[in-house]
Amino acid sequence: MNALDKNISVSAYMNDIGVKARAAARVMVKVPGEHKNAALHAAAQIIAARKDDILAINAEEVKAAIGRKQKASFVDRMTLTPPRIDDIITALGDIAAQDDPVGKVMRKWSRPSGLDFERVRTPIGVIAVIYESRPNVTVDAAAIAVKAGNAVILRGGSECIGTSKALFDCLQEGLAANGLPEGAAQFVETPDRAAVGALLSGLDGNIDLVIPRGGKSLIARVQSEARAPVLSHLDGICHVYIDRDAELGKAVDITLNSKMRRTGVCGAAETLLIDRARVEDLWPPIASALREAGCVLRGDAAIRKIDDAAEPATEEDWGTEYLAPVLSVAVVDGVAGAMAHIEKYSSAHTEAIVTENQETADAFLSGVDSAIVFHNASTQYADGGEFGLGAEIGIATGRLHARGPVGVEELTSYKNIVRGSGQIRP
């Protein structure tokens, strides 16, 4: 069915996608790893050959977004550059290079009954990925899902639908050239918002997992309306804590990179916490580096007492994901104070401690219940590629199934295989 055919309803179009995805999922579980890998390598080659065309399409969409006065963080996420396309190509190769998880034995054991047990990885089935204007997600999500033996349905943001479709076409050609089923990866071409509602309805039970990637309103809607399990995170309210035993150079560099490398990514630091015991000597050089980089600083009373140039921070600031060059700063009483602040305000995404005291670092790493916790490293390493996963679909902040970067392994489930020799249970 053609999404743009006026005679076809969105509901019928989406249901057809669901049927094709389920049929493909039954085939994908049996596709050899080398075929999946060859498909991803082929897609990478096609993207490389069409790089200029993809950049031209993206430039027009970015221009239109700027004309609509979209936020700078939004424009940054939808913008492709030659290096960013190279990153997409590299990610495809990295994903292909990983071990095939399907059929991997996770655990083996035997029982006194004589039964032999195996726990084996299996694909989840059909995965729907709903995302806003992040064209790289088109390739990352599809590649990860396919590598894990799933069928995937992609619904990208309308502002960047041309770029996403151009990337998807490259991927689809690579899959088709290597014998993967037609419905292994599908792209929802209609910008009609009813398509999202159809996906959330579960497409007559054909959706096994929904993964949203985008802003607060999108994720809240998905969590509220989805008729299938949801793997997601809400805000990336990430903290950096500078301890009394921090080395000054590391404190400056890690804070600056955590906040300002890319302010629009979910791993960007939004709050800085400084130990009261060192704030007077740590804060001036940190503040100077941040201001020189163009960051707006909002401090609590203790910060403003030593730095009257800092804007006053409000209660709202501690729970705000700025995705912009703005940083809230608070003074805390040691690592215990830092952990108490994080427990109250964090979105359980990513936190970091800067300290040379291993005992303090261990207390922070074990005591902070977030998906990712760093010691002496930037929060901007909260990224699937940096974790060695090749890429990611997102950062999961829940406590079930997956936490942190969602890569190939996180898009599998498992089954238990039990082998006997005629046993009956007494």
Image (cartoon, rainbow, N blue to C red):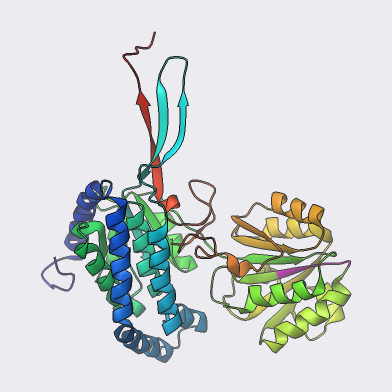
Residue 54 vertical position relative to residue 390 in the rendered view, above or below: below
Task: Indicate whether residue 274 is drawn in magenta.
Answer: yes
Task: Indicate whether residue 403 is drawn in magenta.
Answer: no
Choose top left, top right, bottom left or bottom right for residue 245. bottom right
Tell me if 236 is positioned left or right of 377 in this view. Answer: left
Q: Which residues are magenta?
A: 272-277
User: Which residue is drawn at the image coordinates 34% and 70% (left, top)?
Assistant: 156
User: Which residue is drawn at the image coordinates 69% and 53% (left, top)?
Assistant: 368
Q: Characterize the magenta stretch by its predominant secondary structure.
A: strand
Quadrant holding the N terminus: bottom left
Residue 312 visible in the picture:
no
User: Percent x, y for residue 401?
Assistant: 48, 46
User: Percent x, y for residue 215?
Assistant: 47, 69
Tell me if 192 is positioned left or right of 325 in this view. Answer: left
Tell me if 349 is positioned left or right of 130 in this view. Answer: right
**Viewer-proximal residue among 297 and 84:** 84
**Viewer-proximal residue among 24 and 4:** 24
**Viewer-proximal residue among 403 and 307:** 403
Residue 315 vertical position relative to residue 151 in the rendered view, above or below: below
